[in-house]
Image (cartoon, rainbow, N blue to C red):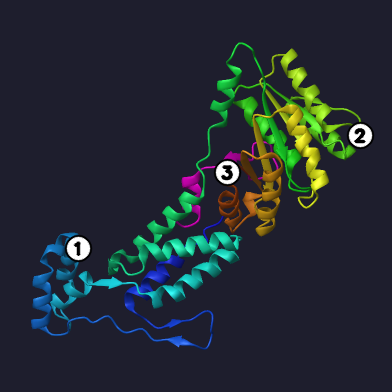
Amino acid sequence: MFKFFKDKIGRWAKKISEGSEVKDLREPEKIVEKKEIPVPMKFNEGMKQFQSDTDKLEDISEEVEEIAKEEPGTRGFFEKVTSRIQKVKISDDDFEIYGEELRMLLLENNVAFEVADKVVAQLEGEIVGKEFLRKEIEAEIRDVLKGIISDILIEPFDIVERIKEKTQDQSKEPFIFLFVGTNGTGKTTTVAKIASFLTKKGFSCVLAAADTFRAASIEQLKYHGKRIDVKVISQDYGADPASVGFDAIQYAKKNFIDCVLIDTAGRMHTSKNLLKEIEKVAKVCKPDLKFFVGESITGNDAVEQVKSFDWAVQIDGIVLTKADIDEKGGTALSLGYVTKKPILFLGTGQEYNKIEVFNKEKFLKELGL
C-alpha cells in the first residue's frame, strides 16, 4: 500500500546536490539552469580547503577510507575529499520547483489541497537557506517530511483500555459505540469486524441495527451477528433509530454485556435533515465513542463528508475501509488534518479478521518515510 514518497525524495536530493538542470513542472518548456557548485580543481586549492575542513573529517571517516582504496586516476586525493565534505545550500529557487513537484505528488495521492499546502510550506521553512552535507540532503528532507506528516496524524488512543476503564466499575455500564458515515462505505461490515475484534479481546458485545431505513441493512447486520456469534437488537423497518439504540443499551445493562455497537443509516453529508437524525441517536444513546467510517480510496470527497459528520456529532475517531486496495494513502493524512482526530482502524479485506489497529509508524514507513 501507499509508498508515494518511495524513491522520490532520493531523486530530489540528487538533483539538488549535483546542481543539475531541472525542468519546471509548471512550464514544461522552461529549463532552469543551475550553477555548478564550485569544487577545488587544483591540488593547492584542495589542500587549503582540506585543511580548513579537518574538523569535519570525523563525520566522513568511512568515506575517506573508501577514497583511499580507489584506483589512481586524474582526480587527486584531496580533491576527492573536499568534494565529499562540501556543503550545499537549498535556495528559494531550488525549492520553488521541488516544492511544486511535491505539492503535485501529494494532490495526485488523495491529499487535500489545504493539507498539501501545509506540508509544502512547512518543509520550505525547515530546509530553505540551510546548509547540508551533500550526502545528508536526502536523509534531511526525508526526516523533515516524516516529522511534518507525523504531526498531522494524531496518535491513536487505546480503545481496549478505554473500555476497561468504564466496564471494570461495579455499576457495569456498557461501553457504547456509534458508527456514522455515508452510504456504501462498508459501515455495517465494519461494525461486525470491530465487534469480532472486541470479542477476541475478551469483551462481550451486542449490535444495534439502527439503520431502519433499509430493510436489507437490518438483515445484513443479523447475518453478520450470527456469523460472529453476537446478539443483534432490531426493530421493524422504518422504526425510530434512536429507539433501537436505546433498546440495545437496556439489553446490555440487563445482561451485563460490555459493549454496544450501534450501526446507523448511511447519510448524505449534504443533507442537514438527515444529519439531524444522527444527532438524535447520539443524544438519546450518549455514546462513549463516535466513529466516522469512510473509504480510504475516496480522496477529497471524504474530507467534506467527515467535516459534516464531525459538525453534527463531534466524532472521536476514524475508520478507513478498503485500505488494502489503496495505493495512495492521502485520505488518512487529509482526514487527520481537518478533524484533528485519530485514524483508529484500517479495513484490509472482506473477512472479519481483516481489520487492523492503525499504527502511525507503520503508515509512515509505507509512505516511504
Give the residue at x 14% y 80%: 76
Give the residue at x 63% y 22%: 203
* Image position of 117 (left or right of 314): left
Which structural element holds mark 1? helix
Indicate the position of residue 163 as horizontal and vertical percent values: 59, 25
Query: Badge 3 is on which residue?
Result: 341
Query: Badge 1 is on which residue?
Result: 60
Q: Nearer the viewer, mark 1 or mark 2?
A: 2
Which structural element holds mark 3? loop
Q: Check whether the beta carbons of the residues at disc 3 and disc 2 lie within 8 A of each other.
A: no
Magenta span: 347-369
Query: Residue 198: which quarter of the image?
Result: top right
Task: Find residue 237 and name its label.
Answer: 2
Q: Check whether the beta carbons of the residues at disc 3 and disc 1 lie within 8 A of each other.
A: no
Q: Amino acid at mark 3?
A: Lys
Indicate the position of residue 324 as horizontal and vertical percent values: 62, 50
Instruction: Check disc 1: other Cα within 10 Å, few if <14, some if 14-19, many if 20+.
Output: some
Give how far apart the Cα atoms at labels 3 and 1 are: 43 Å
